[in-house]
Image: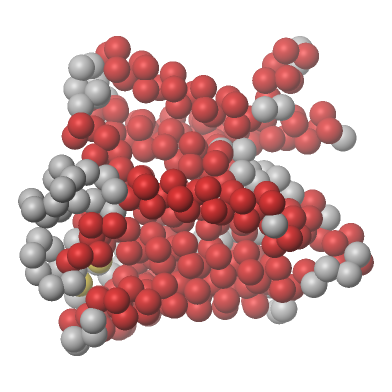
Amino acid sequence: MNSKLKRICSNQQAVVVCALVVICIVFSLMTDKFLQPTTFTNIAKSAYYIAFMAIGVTFVIATGGIDLSIGTVAICSALIGGTLMEKGLPMVLVLLVILATGCAFGLLNGLMVSKLELPAFIATLGTMMMSRGLGSIVSKTKTISFPQGEQPGAWFRELFMITRADSFLPRNFPTGFVLLAITVFIMALLLGRTKIGRYILSIGSNKEATRLSGIPVAKYETIAYVLSGFFASLAGIAYVAVFSTAQPNTGNGFELDAIAGVVIGGTSLAGGVGSVFGTIVGVFIMTVLKIGFPYIGVQSHYQLFITGIILVFAVYMDILNRKRKG
């Protein structure tokens, strides 16, 4: 491989940003429907819950681990909270229960991986099954509908999308972009500028050396999984805020979109390298493809094929980058 391509591959984040810009330009040139307000609303609706899951699992992947449970944990958390809502629990407490449920699953994953030393793939695969089953048990396999419009408790939806006609912002305005931007900024600082982030990246780079240096590896590995669980439950809130319902036996596959976004964004599956900003760009690449294809007459399932190609290329760039660094 020539040196020019190696230099390109060494800066994967710059590549994915350029790729997102190019994709948007191509869709804009191919159809005038793409640059419409409804397009960006649809992109927001499709990206919110995947983006929050991806932010959390970035920390796990940075340790060299994986979390396959985030999709089902997101829906399970929403189903548990929604069931309590139907029993009369105030919406504020419902949201807290949802977040606590995600953290509990994250803690379980972290303890199984760090204390019991189970392979992350197996531990989180088991949690994926447990959370999927628990959501069905608690909800008694029925769909849970969350408040809409002027119904009591519907206010939480305004955090992600303006739905009320009397708001000072236009209806369907994606307020969640503000929440997402703030979250990305905070979590990027956490990963890149704090002790927690440095230790998490150190675990991914060389777990044994990190342990020998006196760092409590189990503690920070567990923290990474708790963060993943917390953001999975936040994704569950975003999902029901946008789509209004949570259905049992769903959520499978969400984790694949989130993990793909993380890897495409430059976080290494081998651990030790992570970027929250890159993760968000990776998620939006997939979302723009999903929304843009139908506008040009291409069936949306082609997104899976192209995302697969992008994912393989992203992993290949990571391998080349690691070889270059020795």
Residue at the outermost bottom position: 87
| Residue 136: percent from left, percent from top | 30, 77
- Residue at 50 percent across and 67 percent down: it is 229
| Residue 194: percent from left, percent from top | 70, 57
Residue 151, quarter of picture: bottom left
Residue 234 lies, with reference to residue 169, above or below; the image says below
Q: What colour scheme does the image use?
A: secondary structure
- Residue at 44 percent across and 46 percent down: it is 181
- Residue at 70 percent across and 16 percent down: it is 5
| Quadrant, the N terminus | top right
Which residue is nearer to you in this view: 216 or 120? 216
| Residue 161: percent from left, percent from top | 23, 51
Compared across the picture, whether 116 is left or right of 248 comes to: right
Compared across the picture, whether 191 is left or right of 295 comes to: right
Which residue is nearer to you in this view: 296 or 96? 96
Can I make out residue 121 in this image? Answer: yes
Residue 3, quarter of picture: top right
| Residue 195: percent from left, percent from top | 73, 60
Can I make out residue 271 in this image? Answer: no
Compared across the picture, whether 315 is left or right of 237 comes to: right
Residue at the outermost front position: 168
Which residue is nearer to you in this view: 250 or 46? 46
Residue 23 lies, with reference to residue 240, above or below; the image says above
Residue 33, quarter of picture: top left
| Quadrant, the C terminus | top right
